[in-house]
Image: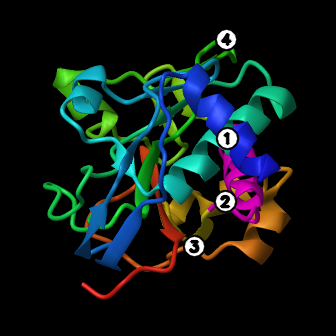
Amino acid sequence: MKSWLIIGLLLVSSGYAYAAESVCYGVPANGRLKGGVKLPTRGRNFQAYSEAGAMLGRTHAHSQVVASIVKAYADLQRSVPGKQYVYGETGLAEGGPFKPHKTHQNGLSVDFMVPVLDARGRSVPLPGGVSNRYGYDIEFDKNARYRDLRIDFEAMAEHLYALHRAGQRDDGAKIDRVIFAPEFLPKLFASRRGAYLRQHLEFTRGKVWWRHDEHYHVDFQVRCHRR
C-alpha cells in the first residue's frame, strides 16, 4: 500500500494519476490494452522523445509498467544526479497495431533513447526532431559516436538496473527482455552494473528488423489475458 502511495504522489506531481490497474491482452506483437496510462511528458531528469508524439497519444503503457518507469527515474535522480534520459514510443491507450512498430500492442513495450554525453562530457538529451524522426533515424558508428555525441553506457546501465529493481516491487513490472545493438553489448557489460545486467536480464542476441543502436527496446512482464 505504501509503495502505491509513493508512485501515486510521483504521478500526481507530474500531472498524471490513475485510479485502476490496466488490463492487457495477448502479446506485444498481437494484443490490446484496457485502461492504458500516459507517461509523464517530462520530469527532473527525463523527457519524452516528442511532445507532439505524446499529444497524439503514443506514450501510453500498462499501469504497472508506468509505475516501474516513474520509480526508476526517481531512483536515478538520487543515484546519478545530472544524468538526462529520454524515453521513446510506447503505445496507444487501447493498444493494438502501432505503426511502424511490430510490437508495442499490449502496453508492455517501451523504447528508451540511449543516454548520451556531449563533447565536454556532459549528459544531454538525445536530439530529436522531424529531420531525424525524433531520434529514431540517428545512426551511431562502430565507436558508439554520432557527431559530437557518444553513448553513455554507464548511464544506460544504471537505468536498466533501476528498472529491474523497480520491477521487483509489488506494483511494478519485471523486465522480460531487452533489445539493443549486439555490437554494443560488450561496452554495456563493461560498465559498473554490467555483471549485474548479464546475470539478471535477458538480452536479444540475434538480428532484429531495426538496428536498435539509438534506442533500447524493453518488453516488460505482466500477466495478460488471451487476445
Relative image position of residue 83 (x, y in whole percent)? 69, 25
Residue linked to disc 4? 120
The type of residue carrying mark 3 is Phe
Residue linked to disc 3? 203
Residue linked to disc 2? 171
The type of residue carrying mark 4 is Arg
For the residues bearing labels 2 and 3, Cβ distance under 8 angstroms: no
Between residues 203 and 64, which one lies in front from this camera angle? 64
- At label 4, counting other C-alpha atoms closer than 10 Å, the crowd grade (few under 14, some 14-19, many 20 or more) is few
Residue linked to disc 1? 7
The type of residue carrying mark 1 is Ile
How far apart, in angstroms, are the residues tagged by discs 2 and 4? Answer: 39 Å
Element on which disc 3 rests: loop
For the residues bearing labels 1 and 2, Cβ distance under 8 angstroms: yes
Q: Residue at x 71, y 60 (%)?
A: 164
**In this view, the mark in front (4 or 3):** 3
Q: Residue at x 77, y 49 (%)?
A: 3
Q: Residue at x 83, y 66 (%)?
A: 196
- At label 1, counting other C-alpha atoms closer than 10 Å, the crowd grade (few under 14, some 14-19, many 20 or more) is many
Element on which disc 4 rests: loop
Task: Determine whether 80 is above or below 208 in the image.
Answer: above
Element on which disc 1 rests: helix
For the residues bearing labels 2 and 4, Cβ distance under 8 angstroms: no
How far apart, in angstroms, are the residues tagged by discs 1 and 2? Answer: 9 Å
**In this view, the mark in front (1 or 4):** 1
Magenta part, dominant SS: helix
Task: Determine whether 159 is above or below 161 in the image.
Answer: above
Relative image position of residue 36 (x, y in whole percent)? 35, 52
